[in-house]
Amino acid sequence: MRHPKVVILGAGSLFFGRQAIWQMVHSEHLRTGTLGLVDTDESRLKNMATLAQKVIENENVPLKLEASVERKDVLKDADFVVLSFADDTVKYRGIDCAIAEKYGIRMCSGDTIGPGGVFRTLREFPVILDCCKDIEAMCPDAWVINYINPTAANGVGLKRFVPQLKSFALCDGLHMPHVKNNYARRAGILGEKETLTPEQDAKFDLRIAGPNHFTWIVKAEYDGKDVVEKIAEALKADAAKETDGGDTGAKAIFNASIGYALYEAFGHIPTCVGHTKEYVRFWQGLGKTPEPIPPLSIWETDLRYKRHEDMWKQVADFNSGATPIGEYMSTFGPDHATDIIENMVANLGKPFYVNTNNNGAVSNLEDDDFLELLCDFTPEGPSPRPVGEAPVGLRGMWAQVLDTHELSAMAAVTGDRDLLRRALLVDPMVSSPADTEKIIEETLQAQRDALQEYWYK
């Protein structure tokens, strides 16, 4: 694959599009290929395509650029198709969180588990399936990389409903090698700004597993010695300095304190606390005894709108020349998806965390359980590295989460209200059948413009 074609469906994604441009221009293995940008919002597409063209010209690389609001104009001959779209997700996540809060369910993110995760699956997965029809027709050998939350629910759905396509799913939380370096620092293996040498990397046996956003350290040893307690102590030290988070957002508040509390509860360290704290029934404000950690804060729609506004202004400043385009390559850096694509194209032999079928990596779970695992990559795709057993206590919670995701995908495809109700009742955050009915009715009515018509027949 000497001149790979990478197509991004949802090029206006501010959390992926800009970094993907950086990597496609930067990588010697990708910049001789083609970057295809697709977005149904013509204004956003134009802004991102303009940015990409300016960077290509400034860096004087032979990368070809294609852009269209119609994916069929761009998909032909694609080697990789990255799914990164979400239609007005800030608005609908705000609706999800507000309705859930009304019925006693506090969501700090609302895009993966709880009613927010279920309804986001209902919004996104049917569109993903429509894209897959065109992918199968125009580039059936392409790798489909899902970057849309809930990435596990959508990834499970892809494996179940379009198994003929090659696919895996991603989240940026366990981007290698950064995540391993971070835990090496917490374990005292590295100084604050140091990175693992190849020799140190080989000695550091770090094993992380679980459903996306609900991953935990299963094993951490350095040179044969357990360093989990050292990592936990670093987390505890951070917790002692923690405040209410200021304006950093609900996903960031009290994460060190909650992470350490979860370690004390389960004997394992969660690796994605900003989301994981939404998967457990604690800190929902339902206990009778006062807790040192307050109930979860609710995801802030206005704060996210402001972040998006600031990021689009950054794009506009590059395009207008207010910020010199020459500063682009020093402003951004590699992205998880394009890192993996580069690795597959050039067969670089780097491992990455991706969401894929377990295939025996976690020995006491089913092969088709869809987990976030460290995988070796070849041009033929990911192969999970062995993890060992899922810890008792976490294992059952992982299964519950995966069942919620699978039921959500099934409901999204069929429009079956019984499956939707079942997905919510299996969900770890939902506790009342009567409230579930209210959540379903109110959310369906509030999001009629974003959901499939079969929900209203």
Image (spheres, helix red, strand yellow):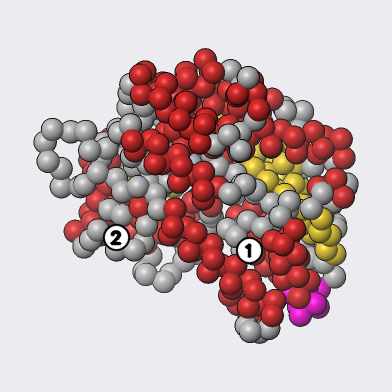
Seen at 71% across and 33% down, the residue is 129
Kind of residue indicated by mark 2: Gly
Seen at 79% across and 53% down, the residue is 69
Q: Is residue 189 visible?
A: no
Q: Is residue 427 above or below residue 239?
A: above
Secondary structure type for disc 1: helix
Secondary structure type for disc 2: loop
- Residue 20: x and y, percent? 67, 61
Q: Given the current orientation, which residue lies at the most extreme left position?
A: 289
Image check: 313 left or right of 178? right
Image check: 184 left or right of 91? left
Residue extent of the magenta highlight: 55-61
- Residue 121: x and y, percent? 56, 34
From the image, state whether disc 1 or disc 2 is nearer to you: 2
Q: As rendered, which of 152 and 85 lies closer to the eye?
A: 85
Q: Which mark is residue 245?
A: 2
Q: Is residue 115 above or below residue 455?
A: below
Seen at 58% across and 72% down, the residue is 313
Compute the Cα span from label 1 to label 2.
27 Å
Seen at 41% across and 41% down, the residue is 97
Image mark count: 2
Q: Is residue 81 magenta?
A: no
Which mark sits nearer the N-terminus, 1 or 2? 1
- Residue 104: x and y, percent? 30, 33
Q: Is residue 407 above or below residue 354?
A: above
Q: As rendered, which of 40 and 430 lies closer to the eye?
A: 40
Residue at image mark 1: 19
Kind of residue indicated by mark 1: Gln
Q: Badge 2: how crowded within 10 Å, few (<14), some, or many (20+)?
A: few
Image quadrant containing the C terminus: top right
Q: Quadrant of residue 25?
A: bottom right
- Residue 384: x and y, percent? 58, 37
